[in-house]
């Protein structure tokens, strides 16, 4: 009797397990089918806009060469719009005349002769100093303007010499702006004669803020021709 009861109880227990297992399998299958259906209803992702590929051209640097033009060349005229000032440039050996004409009215023309000294920095030539002689106003004396970097000493004068034996012209710095410091000289007849006849290389000398004396070569080749042309402008 005991064996029969135990056998029946075991049979009922196995049936219940089978029933629960079948129910769980059916439920899992139903969940899988529902997930598959939901996934099928999701719209397919649209591909994003394709950006066109652009290629940037790298400019090729052209080597810059400095050449001295023969004496008294024909001035070159830069084409500019009618409402812009007209600029002309003429080279006289180591001096350059630059003019700017405002068509006006009234007509207004500014001219100057200049020489720029350059230095080598990191393999490149960079402007260091400028010597400028503006065309003077009528009945006014000629002046010479020196421009050098801002790191200068105001306790010593700037000196312009046509040669080592020339005492030259001396003046103090008059003003400084971010582009440089400036000294103004009045050119009298005696100085003009020396500059015209100078055959050796002169120099521009000054002292920097650290107390070091600096000398910059100054050529007077073509000075006479450039000055005469300037006075005719």
Image: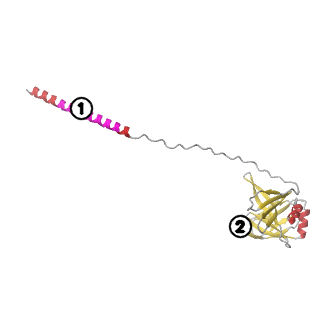
Please state the horizontal and vertical placement of residue 198, each as a whole percent of the image: 90, 62
For the point 86% across and 67% down, the residue is 168
Please state the horizontal and vertical placement of residue 231, each as a whole percent of the image: 87, 66
Q: In the picture provided, is 3 more to the left or to the right than 208?
A: left
In the image, residue 122 above or below residue 225: above
Asked if residue 210 shows in the view, the reply is: no
Among all residues in the image, which is located at the extreme bottom?
139
Q: Which stretch is magenta?
A: 13-37
The residue at which mark 2 appears reads as: 177
For the point 87% across and 65% down, the residue is 232
Q: In the picture provided, is 38 more to the left or to the right than 14?
A: right
Q: Nearer the viewer, residue 211 or 76?
A: 76
Please state the horizontal and vertical placement of residue 189, each as a whole percent of the image: 90, 70
Callout 1 environment at 10 Å: few (<14), some (14 to 19), or many (20+)? few
Q: In the picture provided, is 103 more to the left or to the right than 29?
A: right
The stretch drawn in magenta includes residue 15: yes
In the image, residue 207 above or below residue 70: below
Q: Nearer the viewer, residue 20 or 220?
A: 20
Say which element carries label 2: strand
Image depth: mark 1 or mark 2 in front = 1
Of pointers 1 and 2, the one earlier in the residue sequence: 1
Please state the horizontal and vertical placement of residue 9, each as a whole percent of the image: 13, 30
The residue at which mark 1 appears reads as: 22
């Amino acid at each position: 009797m005991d064996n029969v009861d135990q056998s029946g109880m075991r049979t009922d227990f196995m049936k219940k397990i089978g029933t629960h297992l079948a129910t769980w399998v059916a439920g899992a299958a139903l969940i899988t089918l529902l997930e598959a259906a939901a996934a099928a209803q999701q719209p397919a992702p649209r591909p994003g806009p394709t950006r066109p590929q652009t290629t940037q051209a790298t400019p090729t640097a052209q080597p810059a060469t400095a050449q001295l033009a023969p004496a008294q060349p024909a001035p070159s005229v830069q084409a500019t719009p009618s409402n812009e000032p007209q600029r002309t440039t003429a080279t006289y050996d180591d001096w350059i005349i630059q003019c700017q004409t405002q068509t006006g009215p009234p007509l207004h023309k500014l001219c100057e002769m200049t020489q720029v000294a350059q230095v080598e920095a990191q393999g490149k030539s960079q402007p260091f100093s400028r010597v400028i002689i503006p065309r003077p106003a009528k009945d006014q004396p000629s002046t010479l303007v020196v421009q050098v970097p801002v790191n200068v000493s105001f306790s010593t004068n700037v000196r312009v010499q046509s040669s080592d034996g020339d005492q030259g012209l001396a003046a103090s710095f008059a003003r400084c702006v971010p582009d440089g410091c400036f000294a103004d000289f009045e050119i009298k007849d005696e100085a003009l004669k020396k500059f015209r006849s100078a055959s050796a290389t002169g120099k521009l000398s000054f002292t920097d803020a650290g107390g070091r004396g600096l000398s910059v070569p100054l050529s007077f080749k073509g000075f006479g021709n450039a000055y005469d042309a300037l006075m005719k402008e």
